[in-house]
Amino acid sequence: MEQKRVHFIKSAAPALFILGALAVRMEAQFASIVSDPVQEGHSWQQLANDIEKLKRLDSTILKLEAQYTQMQVNARYFTSKGVWQGIGNQIVSNWTTPNMFGETATWNPAVLFGTGAPAAWQNATIALQRNRYLAGLPVGSSRDLSYLAAVETFDGAGPTALQTLGNARLHQTQMAGAIARLQAAAADGSDGMNSEVQQLNLLTAGTVQHLQMQQTTNNVITSLLEQQTLSNKLQRDAIVDHMNFMNQVDQYMVSQGPSWGGAAQSISNYRSR
């Protein structure tokens, strides 16, 4: 029995030695691993940041998907636009007739197309004769010079008004086609014409057309303001002429004697004032 124990110990000794060596080696290997809490904390924070970024990205994707779905719905069902179509108010073309002696032959082209406005104004108005006796009068001191200034300013504003009127009619005629095409595109119910980009293009085109028409309207208003200014000038000159006349009457009553005399000189003095 004792011999069997000795034999078992001798036979198991190499295996025990090998296990002991492996245990020592594994202990040495795992003992070399060092735990760094700071680095581990950074790694967890980076992982949390990445998770948060993924959440935001997912939210953005959901919003874009909702917008795309809404655009599809609009393009598919927002197609009944015919009830919005309107009719533009066209400027009436006024033809001056009958032009018996050629006095208005150039008037129609001026007010319809803006061509030949100065000649049209000159042919339709009375020509002003030159009064050489007004040459020596100080500017602003005579009724006749005021009237002369009124005629000269009217002769400048009149052709301008004619040409502005003709340009407005011509411009509206040219814009009518562009407005009609814009309206047709806006009323188109097809999917391709109801995309966001297409709708923005239509809005931009409508804004540009509105600005162009507003420019024409501003030109017309400017011409009307000039005409109103000249009308105010005539009223102002008439009032001032009356006041000056009454002043001269008062001076005449004080300066003249009881007997009538020197009428020619009195009239001449009156006209020169």
Image: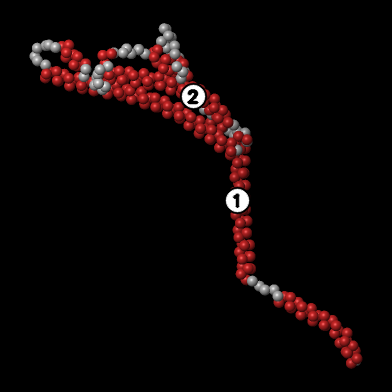
Q: In the image shown, does 180 or 164 lie closer to the viewer?
A: 164
Q: Residue at x 50, y 34 (%)?
A: 207
Q: In the image shown, does 250 or 58 lie closer to the viewer?
A: 250
According to the image, label 2 marks what residue?
Answer: 171
Q: Where is residue 42, by image quadrant?
A: bottom right
Q: Where is residue 253, by image quadrant?
A: top left
Direction from residue 99 to residue 197 in the image, left or right: right
Which of pointers 2 and 1 lies earlier in the amino acid sequence? 1
| Secondary structure under the numbered disc 2 in the rendered image | helix
Q: Which residue is drawn at 30% across and 18% down?
A: 148
Q: Is residue 239 among the parts visible in the rendering?
A: no
Q: Which residue is drawn at 37% across and 21% down?
A: 157
| Secondary structure under the numbered disc 1 in the rendered image | helix
Type of residue at label 1? Answer: Thr
Q: Residue at x 18, y 16 (%)?
A: 269
Instruction: Residue at the far left: name it.
Output: 258
Instruction: Residue at the far front: name it.
Output: 136
Q: In the image shown, does 166 or 90 lie closer to the viewer?
A: 166
In the rendered view, would you say 52 is above or below 213? below
Query: Which mark, by number, is residue 90?
Result: none
Q: Where is residue 46 in the image (x, y as percent from the top left)?
A: 62, 62
Nearer to us: label 2 or label 1: 2
Crowd band around label 2 with a 10 angstrom C-alpha radius: few (<14), some (14–19), many (20+)? some
Direction from residue 175 to residue 261 in the image, left or right: left
Crowd band around label 1 with a 10 angstrom C-alpha radius: few (<14), some (14–19), many (20+)? few
According to the image, label 1 marks what residue?
Answer: 60
In the rendered view, would you say 230 is above or below 75? above
